[in-house]
């Protein structure tokens, strides 16, 4: 753990963001009594599909920011404040979330952070599953079958057709249903470039989060980093070597780095979860 912290500090001493995520094996068994869908300011989605999420499914998958009564969501609210402050300071609206290797929890962080931002009174959020090799946002949220990014890329659906509002105001998801063959070639295509531009231009006030593949092992994330304003790196505690962390930071423009989240760090509290 000390090696990971040292690598992070050397790579970006003044741009480290932190957020709590519970243990990978932990299951939140309590059912939320109030969900975010009960916000006082309500947006009516007339064209975007609206689906109702299962709170128990979300809890089992460590999605805690949907329910504002869940005390574990506080850490993501703190991370949200740090991220929004940095993005507004630089005029950024598109952010990639990645990790050095698999298993660091980048997708769980992506979903929880996106939901937390959506709770912000002035900001709407779109979450896009651009991990074309192992898409998992749909699974984590428990979304039903329907048009997805796969259909958009094949030309069988529009972005609007594939968007989903998971019962949370100011939040939409563009899910990916299945892995995409030759993902690197697809991500570097003009089709994806146009798609990113379309998503970016749709609403000027919206923050867009792209959940990418891990940086090491493929060039998928490297391709996408060229098309976004900034990047947040999620590092799983005890899962990334010092050399891997150093190599990861070589691929990231320091001027684009929002921060680094050390995930799954064991808490001294006795609540059975991992946090910061």
Image (spheres, grey):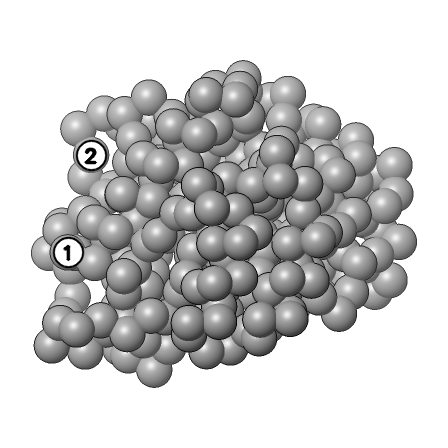
Numbered circle sitting on residue 71: 1
Return the residue found at the far bottom: 25
Q: Is residue 246 above or below residue 271?
A: above
Q: Is residue 64 visible?
A: yes
Q: In this orientation, which residue lies closer to the viewer: 6 or 50?
A: 6
| Residue 271, quarter of the rendered image | bottom left
2 or 1: tag closer to the N-terminus:
2
| Mark 2 surroundings: few (<14), some (14-19) or many (≥20) residues within 10 A | some
Crowd rating for badge 1 (residues with CA inside 10 Å; few <14, some 14–19, many 20+): few
Say which residue appears at 64% left-offset and 20% top-offset: 201
Q: Which residue is mark 2?
A: 39
Name above or below for residue 114 compared with residue 109. above
Residue 45: image x %, image y %? 42, 30
> Which residue is at a point 67% across and 47% down the rendered structure image?
252
Q: Position of residue 233 (x, y in %)?
A: 53, 53
Residue at point 16%, 66% (across, down): 31
């Amino acid at each position: 753990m000390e090696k990971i912290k040292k690598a992070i500090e050397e790579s970006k001493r003044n741009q480290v963001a932190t957020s709590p995520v519970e243990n990978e094996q932990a299951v939140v068994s309590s059912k939320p009594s109030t969900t975010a869908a009960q916000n006082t300011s309500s947006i009516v989605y007339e064209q975007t599909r609206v689906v109702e999420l299962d709170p128990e499914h979300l809890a089992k998958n460590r999605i805690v920011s949907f329910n504002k009564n869940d005390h574990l969501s506080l850490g993501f609210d703190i991370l949200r404040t740090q991220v929004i402050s940095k993005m507004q300071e630089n005029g950024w609206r598109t952010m990639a979330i990645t990790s050095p290797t698999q298993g660091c929890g980048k997708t769980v962080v992506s979903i929880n952070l996106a939901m937390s931002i959506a709770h912000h009174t002035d900001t709407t959020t779109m979450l896009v599953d651009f991990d074309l090799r192992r898409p998992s946002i749909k699974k984590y949220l428990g979304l039903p079958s329907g048009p997805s990014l796969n259909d958009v890329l094949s030309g069988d659906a529009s972005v609007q057709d594939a968007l989903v509002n998971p019962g949370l105001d100011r939040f939409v998801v563009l899910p990916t249903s299945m892995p995409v063959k030759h993902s690197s070639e697809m991500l570097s295509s003009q089709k994806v470039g146009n798609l990113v531009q379309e998503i970016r231009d749709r609403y000027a006030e919206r923050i867009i989060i792209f959940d990418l593949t891990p940086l090491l092992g493929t060039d998928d994330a490297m391709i996408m980093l060229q098309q976004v304003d900034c990047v947040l790196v999620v590092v799983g505690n005890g899962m990334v070597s010092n050399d891997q962390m150093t190599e990861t930071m070589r691929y990231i423009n320091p001027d684009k780095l929002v921060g680094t989240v050390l995930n799954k760090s064991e808490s001294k509290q006795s609540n059975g979860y991992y946090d910061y």
